[in-house]
Image: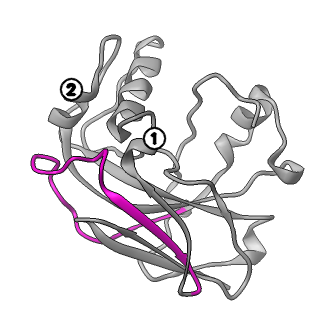
Amino acid sequence: MGVETPVFGFLADYFAVPEGGEAKMSELIHPKVEPEIAFVTKAPLKGPGCHIGAVLAATDFVMPAIEVIDSRYRDFKFDLKSVVADNCSSSRFVVGGRMAPVDNLDLRTLGVVLEKNGQVVSLGAGAAVLGHPAAAIAMLANLLGERGEEIPAGTLILSGGITEAVAVAAGDNVTLRIQELGSVNLRFV
């Protein structure tokens, strides 16, 4: 997308869609979905120097998440300033499945299957996110640390898309299945 600098957006409470719930197309422009691993922290994380091990130690649990991205820019074509102004295209999300501690999980090798209307549309593994999904969380903590900020305990963080984003339309039903974590789904109406 032409953006080479790490960026992050914020998830507002009204972005949340209940598990199995509906996202209204009338509130969106041209949405796409991304399969992600959601982290919930039990301790604060702060950089500089935050690393994967620190993230895992500060993680209460992980679970499947579908992020609905929806750029205000035609064909998702933007520069760095534009994507930041657009809150990194964040618009909706749903979390669900099994809340699992990370102790006995290798997040890099967790298999991911994204289905649209019962058909597999993408496959991946956790390693698609910077080699390890916790690396994205560490990167966020380090970016915030440069500003004197931290990730507080109890924060929900989506690690980033594991596969290419998939376009959706009214009537589509999207299900994400992650090995060891179960599944989560939503419908577009």
> In the rendering, at what x and y percent does residue 162 appear?
49, 51
Mark 2 and mark 1: Cα distance apart in space:
17 Å
Q: Residue at x 30, y 19 (%)?
A: 50
111 displayed left or right of 4: left
Residue 63 is tagged as: none
Helix, strand or loop status at disc 1? loop
Helix, strand or loop status at disc 2? helix
110 or 49: nearer the viewer: 110
45 displayed left or right of 113: left
**Main secondary structure type of the part rendered in magenta:** loop
Mark nearer the N terminus (2 vs 1): 2
Q: How is the image coloured?
A: one colour
| Residue ID for mark 2 | 54
> In the rendering, at what x and y percent does residue 42 appear?
18, 41
Q: Residue at x 85, y 52 (%)?
A: 75
Q: Depth-wise, is mark 2 or mark 1 nearer the camera?
A: 1
Amino acid type, callout 2: Ala
Pointers 2 and 1 in contact (C-beta within 8 Å): no
Classify mark 2: residues with Cα within 10 Å, few (<14), some (14-19) or many (20+): some
171 or 87: nearer the viewer: 171
Q: Residue at x 59, y 86 (%)?
A: 117
Q: Residue at x 23, y 69 (%)?
A: 98
| Residue ID for mark 1 | 129
Image-quadrant location for residue 130: top left
> In the rendering, at what x and y percent does residue 136 appear?
42, 33
Classify mark 1: residues with Cα within 10 Å, few (<14), some (14-19) or many (20+): many
Image-quadrant location for residue 58: top left
Asked if residue 103 lies in the magenta stretch, the reply is yes
Asked if residue 109 lies in the magenta stretch, the reply is yes
Quadrant of the snapshot with the N terminus:
top right
State which region is magenta. Answer: 93-117
